[in-house]
Image: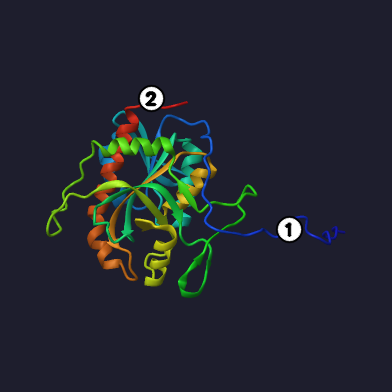
Amino acid sequence: MPKSPPSKLRNAPPVIYPGIPVAGRRKPRPSRNLTLVLGAIPHESELVEWAMTHRTRAKLQGFPYVKGRIAGRPVVLAVTGIGKTNAALITTLFVEHFRPREVIMTGTASRINPEIRNGDVIVGAVTCNHDFGSLGAGYAMEYFGAEGPLGDSSPILYPAEPRLLAAAQRALGRHTPEVAFHQTPAYLPLVRVGRLTAGDQFGITDERIADIRKQLQPDLMEMESGTAAQVCWYLRTPFICIRSGSNRTQNSPDNDYQTLSPFAARQAALFTVSLVGELAGRKAPR
């Protein structure tokens, strides 16, 4: 006969700690000398592929990727699909298989900071998840550190890896964006360091926008980077995200997104190429 289960569980329910926990630094694990670049959808990554030489195409567990070089640096380029679950799937699969020295995510994002213009590029000094917590009255989120897979308190804020952030800041000095001639008057987009946030909603209410801005102070909002950052942190793989502003953050963004995202996708991808070139010019640490 089967044994009866124990009368009491060995493990107590998890303790929830209110607040916005920040990921601490973790020592990178042993890696290969290559860069993994991820975009959510093909139009966010196609200019990265254009910049690659010695391109070859293959599939990993059925998921396509391109392998080649940018400025001599080995690069693997893959598309995650939209949303946090897809981002977690592809990031985990490709990081575990290729063991890259770093992961760069590129793409578009909505402009939750009203000072950001279409095509302005934000290098994510901090990437976070804005939809993890308890949603209260007035659409205000109570953030907390919940139990993670190591019995730890999973962070919500993920600072960029310092080596990659320093390389991005050097790349700022030699990168020139494309002029936004489709806007009146035309302007040269800015590229700067800032804050990114991600969640699984494409459009959100004005109340949620106000609360996210108050608590997290992001410049851009999208749907993948927070999860990719979390995966890379747990797998001890340096991560940084490059995003460019498309539509403003709003309740029904579809038409603006269709119109404005192509230019934004170009600017993020072109700066990503500049960043990979900066990494190629430095001897990689071991």
Taking the spot 59% from the left edge, 57% from the top edge, the residue there is 146
**Looking at the image, which is closer to me, 79 or 145?**
145
* Element type where label 1 sits in the image: loop
Quarter holding the N terminus? bottom right
In space, the residues marked 2 and 1 are separated at their CA atoms by 48 Å
Residue farthest toward the right in the current orientation of the protein: 1
Residue 138, given in percent of the width and then of the height, sits at 46, 74
* Element type where label 2 sits in the image: loop
Residue 166, given in percent of the width and then of the height, sits at 37, 36
What residue would you read off at disc 1? 12
Residue 172, given in percent of the width and then of the height, sits at 27, 39
Task: Using residue 75 as the reference point, say whether residue 24 is left or right of it.
Answer: right
Say how the picture is coloured.
Answer: rainbow
Task: Using residue 153 as the reference point, say whether residue 239 is left or right of it.
Answer: left
Instruction: Count residues near mark 1 (Cα–Cα under 10 Å), then give few for <14, some for 14-19, many for 20+.
Output: few
What residue would you read off at disc 2? 283
**Height in image: 4 above or below 101?**
below
